[in-house]
């Protein structure tokens, strides 16, 4: 038996992504094989495709950090799921495939009330938002929260999580047309330009930053005393999905070099989060898997913005990298 994968064979435009046929492999003793219905598409996948993701494997490799589908087979030591169960899973690369094989502790039961598409929209976004808000920034009732990436998959969950604990939430977008989308989650909405131009918008207890680069510098000035910023990417280094080395280099150069002595004056904190590195740690994998149960308890609802056939992965990447998306972009395998 065989299944399909999408591989990055060379760096470049979305059209370089290649669909290929590979042989199925039986799961090991502590593994689960999943027949994938949906694969999540993340901005990190675009950075991998452009050659700007230092943690990516050597080419050719299959990108993708999350899937949802039904269990196809289990290893002899696996007891938490059985064939036919609907599940989601985090994948340490390899998620762009119609069948994946993962460690049993990476398999997540699909939350009640959510379909498989919503399940595929959860793992990366939930883990990132949870780590940023609850493990690093410790957001609590009464906090003023700014979500820079409010219309993306992480931002949608971050707004819901912050509102659930009683925080006051503001969301940013690059286009005015998306402001109503943000308001739909009970947040105040601004375009990035509107927010930056209004110097009175200060005193934030937490800022979730995805742009990195020069955006960090002016956003830090909006933190209040004991405010925390968590940076989850350097998206400002990529524009329109083009491989532009000078632009990425400029974003890196413009990323602030932050002095601890200066932070004494500001009484603020800066965190950097690479969720992939966290998921290398077995203790954290287990901890985050347990925390995933809160998706159901909190009533979190991921927003699936658009689903593309897996064979049209190039269009999915172009849709995301040109900022047309709201919420999560998925690939469908059937």
Image (cartoon, helix red, strand yellow):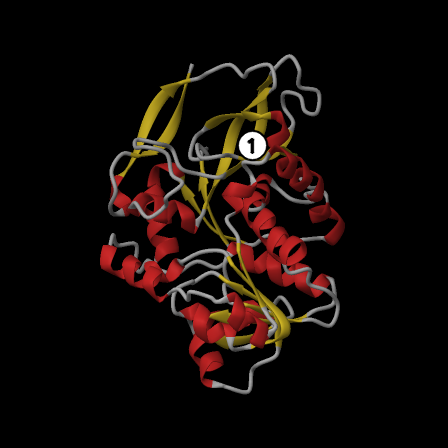
Look at the numbered disc 1 and give the secondary structure of its residue: strand
Please give the residue where the numbered disc 1 appears in the rendered image.
Answer: 69
Residue count near mark 1 (Cα–Cα under 10 Å), binned few <14, some 14–19, many ≥20? many
In the displayed structure, would residue 99 be above or below residue 278?
A: above
In the displayed structure, would residue 256 be above or below residue 11?
A: below
Q: In the displayed structure, does residue 290 sit left or right of residue 275? A: right
The residue lying toward the viewer, choosing from 69 and 232, is: 232
Any part of residue 48 in sight: yes
Report x, y in % for residue 240. 30, 59
Residue found 35% across the figure and 42% down from its top = 313
Image-quadrant location for residue 229: bottom right
Report x, y in % for residue 316. 37, 48
Image-quadrant location for residue 308: top left
Image-quadrant location for residue 16: top left
The residue lying toward the viewer, choosing from 136 and 211, is: 136
Location of the N terminus by quadrant is top left
Report x, y in % for residue 138. 69, 60
Any part of residue 117 in sight: no
Outermost residue, front side: 261
In the displayed structure, would residue 133 be above or below residue 19?
A: below
Report x, y in % for residue 49. 32, 44
Residue found 69% across the figure and 48% down from its top = 295
Residue found 53% across the figure and 46% down from its top = 275
């Amino acid at each position: 038996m065989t299944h399909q994968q999408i591989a990055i064979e060379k760096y470049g435009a979305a059209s370089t992504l290649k669909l290929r046929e590979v042989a199925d492999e039986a799961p090991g003793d502590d593994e689960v094989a999943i027949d994938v219905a949906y694969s999540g598409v993340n901005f990190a996948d675009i950075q991998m495709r452009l050659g700007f993701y230092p943690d990516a494997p050597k080419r050719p490799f299959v990108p993708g950090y999350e899937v949802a589908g039904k269990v196809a087979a289990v290893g002899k030591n696996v007891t938490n799921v059985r064939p036919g169960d609907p599940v989601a899973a985090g994948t340490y690369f390899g998620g762009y495939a119609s069948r994946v094989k993962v460690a049993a502790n990476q398999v997540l039961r699909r939350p009640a009330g959510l379909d498989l598409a919503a399940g595929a929209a959860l793992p990366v976004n939930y883990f990132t938002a949870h780590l940023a808000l609850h493990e690093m920034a410790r957001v609590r009732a009464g906090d003023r929260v700014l979500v820079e990436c409010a219309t993306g998959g992480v931002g949608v969950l971050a707004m819901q999580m912050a509102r659930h604990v009683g925080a006051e939430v503001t969301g940013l977008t690059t286009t005015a047309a998306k402001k109503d989308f943000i308001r739909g989650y009970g947040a105040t909405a601004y375009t990035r330009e509107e927010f930056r131009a209004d110097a009175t918008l200060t005193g934030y207890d937490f800022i979730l930053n995805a742009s990195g680069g020069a955006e960090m510098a002016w956003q830090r000035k909006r933190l209040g005393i004991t405010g925390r910023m968590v940076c989850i990417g350097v998206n400002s280094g990529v524009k329109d999905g083009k491989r532009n080395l000078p632009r990425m280099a400029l974003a890196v150069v413009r990323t602030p070099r932050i002095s601890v002595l200066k932070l004494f004056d500001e009484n603020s904190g800066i965190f950097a989060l690479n969720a992939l590195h966290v998921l290398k740690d077995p203790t954290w994998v287990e901890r985050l898997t347990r925390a995933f149960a809160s998706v159901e308890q909190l009533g979190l609802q991921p927003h699936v913005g658009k689903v593309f056939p897996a064979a049209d992965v190039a269009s999915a990447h172009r849709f995301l990298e040109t900022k047309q998306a709201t919420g999560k972009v998925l690939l469908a395998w059937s």
